Amino acid sequence: MDFVAQLEGITKVYHKGRDAPAVYALGGVDLTISRGQYVAVMGPSGSGKSTLMNILGCLDRPTAGRYLLEGQDVARMSDDELSRIRGTRLGFIFQAFNLINQLTVLGNVQVPLFYQGVHRRIRKQRAREAIDRVGLSDRADHRPAELSGGQMQRVAIARALVNQPSILFADEPTGNLDSTTGKSILALVDELHQQGLTIIMVTHDESIAHRCQRVIRLRDGTIESDTLRDVKVEAAM
């Protein structure tokens, strides 16, 4: 089986002060994610789901354990190396859209490629392809203030796709949207999964988790349950 991510004995400990007890955010997590899976990560506040996502997304390093991303151990990489991994192999969608107000849609989507040093002509071409993929070709020259919430989230998705990531991370991607707009965004994420993309989504919403092939539930820094489901995405829409 082709694993895109493998966690082996991942522990994350936070030390809040000399006299304060250590806080174990993750306590020896073992986890493998197959290429092309659609995974929901759930759990109550303080369960460790944000810490797990930060480690999977190379936003943080574990205190102990190994993290193999496409076979490469990234757990001990430097900040610069992790930044390079994020920019070339991972995509992120957040609850807050995190767009740059001064840039057009086309400009916002190009940002990850700009930091990679990709040539301007190629940046624009790949950005236009990503914008078309999320159905916003007619908004390429608009700025965020001229867009609806759903359109802004589609721009954020296009930006996450522009580097052709191995994994797309989504952290409560519909949290700032009304229910109808949220459903259209989830339908787009479903479509991206159907096209073969690996998606890992943090959510507290059972109806959103119900769309996913696999549901991982955390509690007190450990995996409480890990359920594979026989899901037809069309039925969940």
Image (cartoon, rainbow, N blue to C red):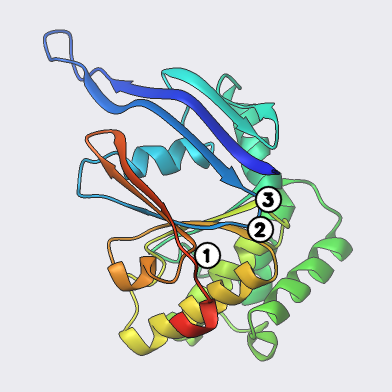
> Which residue does the image show at 61% across and 22% down from the upper left?
77
Residue placed under numbered mark 1 in the picture: 100
Of pointers 1 and 3, the one earlier in the residue sequence? 1
Q: Amino acid at mark 2?
A: Val
Distance between the Cα atoms at labels 2 and 3? 18 Å
Asked if residue 202 is positioned above or below residue 1 in the image, the reply reads below
Camera-side residue of 64 and 235: 235
Mark 1 falls on what kind of element? Answer: loop
Q: Amino acid at mark 1?
A: Ile
Residue 53 lies left or right of residue 218; in this view the side is right
Mark 3 falls on what kind of element? Answer: loop
Residue placed under numbered mark 3 in the picture: 166
Asked whether the residues under the numbered discs 2 and 3 touch, taking CB atoms below 8 Å apart as contact, a structural biologist would say: no
Distance between the Cα atoms at labels 1 and 3? 24 Å
Q: Amino acid at mark 3?
A: Ser
Mark 2 falls on what kind of element? Answer: helix
Q: Nearer the viewer, mark 2 or mark 3?
A: 3
Residue placed under numbered mark 2 in the picture: 111
Asked if residue 205 is positioned above or below residue 34 in the image, the reply reads below
Q: Residues within 10 Å of mark 2 (few under 14, many from 20)?
A: some
Camera-side residue of 185 and 101: 185
Distance between the Cα atoms at labels 1 and 2? 9 Å
Q: Nearer the viewer, mark 1 or mark 3?
A: 3
* Residue furthest to the left: 19
Of pointers 2 and 3, the one earlier in the residue sequence? 2
Residue 69 horizontal/vertical position (percent): 64, 35
Of pointers 1 and 2, the one earlier in the residue sequence? 1
Q: Residues within 10 Å of mark 1 (few under 14, many from 20)?
A: some
